[in-house]
Amino acid sequence: MKSESEAGRCATLVLAADRHAGDVVASATGVACKALAPVGGMPMVRRVIRSLRASRLVGRIALVGPARDLLRRDAELERDLGDGTLGWLENAGSPSASAARALEAVPPGQPVLLTTADHALLSPAIVDHFLERALAGDCDFVVGVARLDTVQARYPDTRRTAIRLRGGPYCGCNLFAFASPRGRELAVFWRRIEQERKRPWRVIAGALGPLATLRYLLGRLTLEQALTRLSRKLDMKIGAVVLPFAEAAIDVDSRADLALVERILAQRTAETERSVQP
């Protein structure tokens, strides 16, 4: 078991509750919540936990939701929750509210990594790459992104929500580092982003003002400019890590995402089997 007190390691929160009842992925796989949906023969939340545990920069891990009785349906999760090697916190009404509540349970001086249970392709390499860069600077809060062309070059059929900035567009990767106590204040702003996540220009308009919004709409605003202005607006230093991994931007939000991730995992299994053949 990894300890939160281990130097250089992040306490890690995994948002695992469904956004709403009747989640399409949960329904498609016949499970009570999306986090328990089997992907490549394993509940995807367990895939996320295993990748996090294999990272040298991750300390104690806690799930934020779903309801505790739902997790009892998975023997491995129930064992880990029972012996304390995995933590659990009750979720709130939305991912941002859940994150804010969960952050209160972590000591203020402890850096925190936040990710999601539907990040089924998360790997230790992705986690380490992100955290190495996120914690090396002086930012209060850091978000992981990937260029859309990085994703489409490897998986041309996938469709992802992207923010159109010069040098991008960029896709979110469901990786967030709260590197300082001040950075945790961003959970309040996140609630606005959450409400407008399919219309990012509204967030930019409210946070950065009309000039930045115009530049964004014209495709002239860079990621660095956006982060600098947002940092000034919120009185904290916000940074981004541009990840070179296409898989970092693929979460399981739809049946199409589920099918894509299944294909990727099946291909990996086949490649592994071929590599060990005499």
Image (spheres, grey):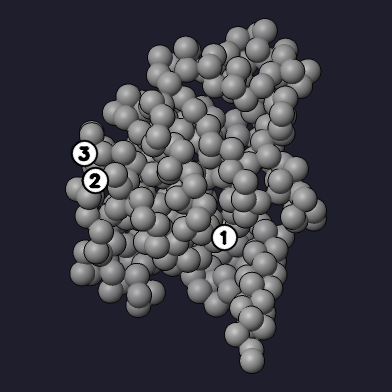
Report how far apart the C-alphas of labels 1 and 2 lie in the structure.
27 Å
For image coordinates 34% across by 70% down, the residue present is 77
Report how far apart the C-alphas of labels 2 and 3 lie in the structure.
14 Å
| Residue positioned most to the bottom | 278
Residue 253, compared with residue 76, is above or below; it is: above
Nearer to the camera, 276 or 81: 276
Q: Are marks 1 and 2 in contact (CB under 8 Å)?
A: no
For the residue labelled by badge 2, is the local secondary structure a helix, a strand or a loop? loop
Q: Earlier in the sequence, mark 2 or mark 3?
A: 2
For the residue labelled by badge 3, is the local secondary structure a helix, a strand or a loop? loop
For image coordinates 34% across by 41% down, the residue present is 112
For image coordinates 23% across by 33% down, the residue present is 108
Say which residue label 2 marks.
7
Mark 2 belongs to which amino acid? Answer: Ala
Q: Quadrant of residue 200?
A: top right
Say which residue label 1 marks.
121
Residue 62 in view (yes/no): no
How busy is the neighbourhood of tag 2: few (under 14 within 10 Å), some, or many (20 plus)? few
Say which residue label 3 marks.
107
Nearer to the camera, 172 or 269: 269
